[in-house]
């Protein structure tokens, strides 16, 4: 049993996939935050253009 646990703790074959998943999630969160920050500015810009038309 202890040999199996030692083998499992040394096995890092799935580590890369987990890291890529975390990076993708971080990029997704950053995109959502960035787009929400731009939303207010774009709304004001389009409302200004629509008002001038």
Image (cartoon, helix red, strand yellow):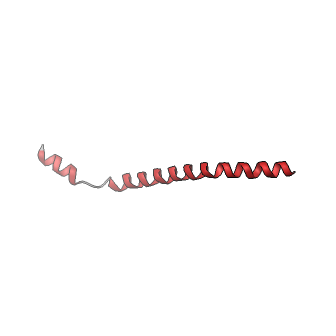
Q: Residue furthest top?
A: 1
Q: Residue furthest right?
A: 53
Q: Residue at x 60, y 51 (%)?
A: 37
Q: Residue at x 17, y 46 (%)?
A: 5
Q: Residue at x 37, y 51 (%)?
A: 18
Count of numbered circles on the image: 0
Residue 43 x/y as whole percent: 71, 48
Left or right of 8 on screen, residue 49 = right
Residue 48 x/y as whole percent: 79, 51
Residue 28 x/y as whole percent: 51, 51
Left or right of 12 on screen, residue 42 = right
Using the image as rendered, state which of residue 37 and residue 20 is in the foreground. 37
Left or right of 17 on screen, residue 26 = right
Left or right of 47 on screen, residue 28 = left
* Quadrant position of the N terminus in the picture: top left
Locate residue 19: give its quadrant: bottom left
Q: Residue at x 27, y 55 (%)?
A: 12
Using the image as rendered, state which of residue 23 and residue 16 is in the foreground. 23
């Amino acid at each position: 049993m202890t040999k199996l646990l030692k083998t499992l703790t040394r096995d890092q074959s799935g580590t890369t996939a987990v890291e890529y998943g975390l990076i993708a999630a971080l990029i997704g969160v950053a995109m959502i935050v960035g787009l929400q920050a731009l939303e207010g500015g774009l709304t004001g810009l389009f409302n200004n253009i629509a008002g001038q038309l």
